[in-house]
Structures are given as structure tokens and as C-alpha cells.
């Protein structure tokens, strides 16, 4: 079975829940919905290949560690961040008397 949706979805191996059921964690609702479209074909293929008609797959959207809301920085905030990471940035700003206000 060759499917781009399946390749992406199976990039993380499923966990065995019980003897015949496997949990497939997806990264988003969209990925779960796309997998649902091919799930029955995939399960049928697995059952045929493994000679086991009891196999089932359930999906669950996994929680990510990334913040749900991405915040964009202004030019001044970017400069302050760079200065915190590398104090040489602040020295250059002072040495060349750079006036870096909001653009």
C-alpha cells in the first residue's frame, strides 16, 4: 500500500493497546481526518497481509509542546532578544551610535 498520507501518519510507530488494537497518534485533526479516509483500506490490507481479521486501529491527536499561539516580534524586540543572546550586539549598537527605532 503506497499512500503519502500513510507515510506521514506512520512516521511515528503505532502503540499496541491490546492484542488486536493499535493506537496511532497523529499531529493534527487534519492528519486524523485524512487518515480516516484511507483507514478501512489500510486495515483491510493489514488483515490480509497478516492473516488476522481482528486488527483495528484507533487514532488520537497528540499534544505538542509548541505554544498554540505564535507571537511575532517587532524590530525593537528582535534587537533586544539578539542583545540578550549576544551582548556584542549591544556593544556594536553603542560603538557605532546606531539609532534603531521602530521602522
Image: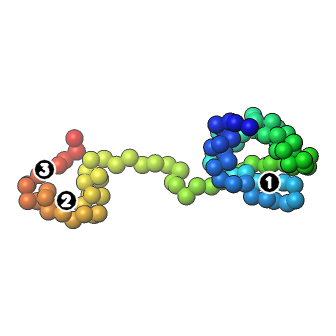
Q: Is residue 68 left or right of residue 45?
A: left
Q: Nearer the viewer, residue 47 or 18?
A: 47
**Which residue is drawn at the image coordinates 18% and 63% (left, top)?**
88
Report how far apart the C-alphas of labels 1 and 2 lie in the structure.
52 Å
- Is the residue 63 above or below the residue 40 in the image? below
Q: Which residue in the structure is indicated by mark 2?
A: 89
Question: Badges 2 and 3: C-beta atoms under 8 Å apart?
Answer: no
| Residue closest to the far left | 96
Residue in the image at 69% along x and 54% along y: 13
Q: Is residue 74 left or right of residue 10?
A: left
> In x, y percent, where is residue 2?
70, 36
Residue 33 can be seen, yes or no: no
Mark 1 vs 2: CB contact within 8 A: no
**Residue 53 point in image, percent of width and height:** 92, 46
Q: CA distance from mark 2 to mark 3?
A: 13 Å
Quadrant in the rendering for residue 47: top right
- Asked if residue 71 shows in the view, the reply is yes
Q: Between disc 1 and disc 2, whose residue precedes? A: 1
Circle 3 residue: 99
- Mark positioned earlier in the residue sequence (1 or 3): 1
Q: Considering the numbered disc 1 on the image, is that residue within a helix, a strand or a loop?
A: strand
User: Which label belongs to residue 22?
Assistant: 1
Look at 84% across and 54% down and name the residue there: 21
Q: Which element type, helix, strand or loop, lies under badge 3?
A: loop
Q: Residues within 10 Å of mark 1 (few under 14, many from 20)?
A: some
Task: Point out the frontmost of discs 1 and 3.
Answer: 1
Which is more N-terminal, label 3 or label 2? Answer: 2
Position above or below: 36 against 91: above
Quadrant in which the C terminus appears: top left
Amino acid at each position: 500500500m503506497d499512500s503519502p498520507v500513510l507515510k506521514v501518519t506512520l512516521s511515528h510507530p503505532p502503540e499496541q493497546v491490546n492484542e488486536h488494537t493499535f493506537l496511532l497518534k497523529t499531529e493534527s485533526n487534519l492528519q486524523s481526518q485524512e487518515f480516516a479516509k484511507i483507514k478501512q483500506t489500510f486495515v483491510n490490507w493489514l488483515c490480509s497481509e497478516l492473516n488476522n481479521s481482528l486488527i483495528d486501529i484507533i487514532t488520537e491527536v497528540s499534544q505538542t509542546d509548541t505554544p498554540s499561539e505564535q507571537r511575532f516580534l517587532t524590530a525593537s524586540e528582535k534587537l533586544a532578544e539578539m542583545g540578550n543572546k549576544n551582548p556584542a550586539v549591544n556593544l556594536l549598537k553603542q560603538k557605532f551610535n546606531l539609532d534603531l527605532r521602530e521602522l
